Image (cartoon, coloured by chain):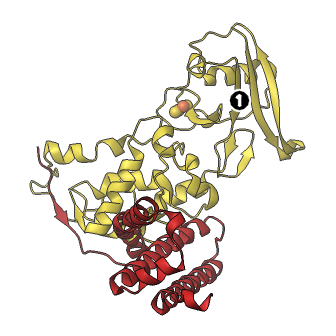
Chain colours: A yellow, B red
Amino acid sequence: MDISLKVFRYNPEAGRTKPAYDTYLLNGVDPTDRILDLLEEVKDYHDGTLSFRRSCAHGVCGSDAMRINGVNRLACKALVQDLNSNSITVEPILGLKVIKDLIVDMKPFFDSYKSVMPFMINDDIPEDGKERLQSIADRERFDDTTKCILCAACTTSCPTFWSDDKYVGPAAIVNAHRFIFDTRDQAAEERLNILNDESGVFRCRTAFNCTEACPREIHVTQAVAEVKQAIVSGVIK
Amino acid sequence: MTTTVRKIKKQSNFEITSWKWMRYSAVALLPLVWIHVLIKDVIVGVHNIDTFYVRDIWAIWGWKVYDILLLAFTFAHGVNGLRNVSMDFFHSEKARKIVDWGLIVLWVLVSGIGALAIIAGARPEMLV
Ligand code: FES
């Protein structure tokens, strides 16, 4: 099939100071090709200056989240046939500063991520000196939020984040959830304290964009709601 | 399979209170608004409401209290919603403080004037 691929371009260093779109006509595209394949084809055969992030190409590293026909997706997971259209528009994710073409500055995103202390905090020595044991149910409790690959698809689909980049955003909350609900961790109270301020969980208006955007199918809005509940009730269960 | 329940110190700050307020006031508004709509729009009918009707209704203290509560709750719920939306447009601490205070003053003023009017009651004879 033939595809018309419209790509957002911006490269102030090379004189392209005004954001614009370039359109490439690609022939012989297989419906099962991924959008990442199309971008690679453009970069290899049409315009070597096109820039985008990618690494694993298998939906694991989270580096190629972009807006594809208006929806946040991973370019390496979205197939041409999923889009039901011969014209495909690819743009950078919203709410973060564009550095070049499809590459955005992820620093504010990772700053929010770091702010919730996304690592296990437990200063006690494990009972047997080696392992911290946990029941199957307790491990299951936060399984969903362990799946995050930090691609930023959720945070950059959030209307609150678009209008206020101080909002910590769903990805940071998901990663806080992963430790708050882990019985082996001891810093739940601290994390909930970080998340209960003006730029924390209560800015979430349950738009559900994050849940729809997540390429890992994490129940993001539910995780945010559970964190809100834990703050309000003082009970983590 | 049950999970371990852990308790932490219950936290409290303005954001938590305002979030809870939105939920509780929404629940309170359900009966307040629906009873109001049922009586005024369905049972009495808006075309039958005139100053004489209002005078008679506000002669009863229970209805005065009801209407003041309805006004205060609805408006506070709305103003808090507005405060949340305003944060999308005002990002600095200072601007947010000014907006918050403006909204509080607006709420007190409108609720106050409304409550005064309700307590004073309607006097149709003065219109004639
Ligand atoms: S390239 Fe790694 S997730 Fe797409």
For image coordinates 46% across by 72% down, the residue present is B74
For image coordinates 56% across by 69% down, the residue present is B82
Q: Is residue A17 above or below residue B63?
A: above
Q: Quadrant of the C terminus of chain B?
A: bottom right
The image quarter containing residue A192 is bottom left
Q: Within 8 Å: ligand 1 and the Cβ of disc 1?
A: no
Q: Is residue A89 above or below residue A220?
A: above
- Residue B87 x/y as whole percent: 59, 68
Instruction: Give whichever of A224, B74 is nearer the camera.
Output: B74
Instruction: Give whichever of A85, A39 is nearer the camera.
Output: A85
- Residue A20 x/y as whole percent: 83, 38
Read off the chain for label 1: A
Q: Quadrant of the N terminus of chain B?
A: top left
- Name the residue beneath numbered marker 1: A89
Name the residue type under label 1: Thr
Q: Which residue is most to the right?
A: A15
Q: Is residue B64 above or below residue B31?
A: below
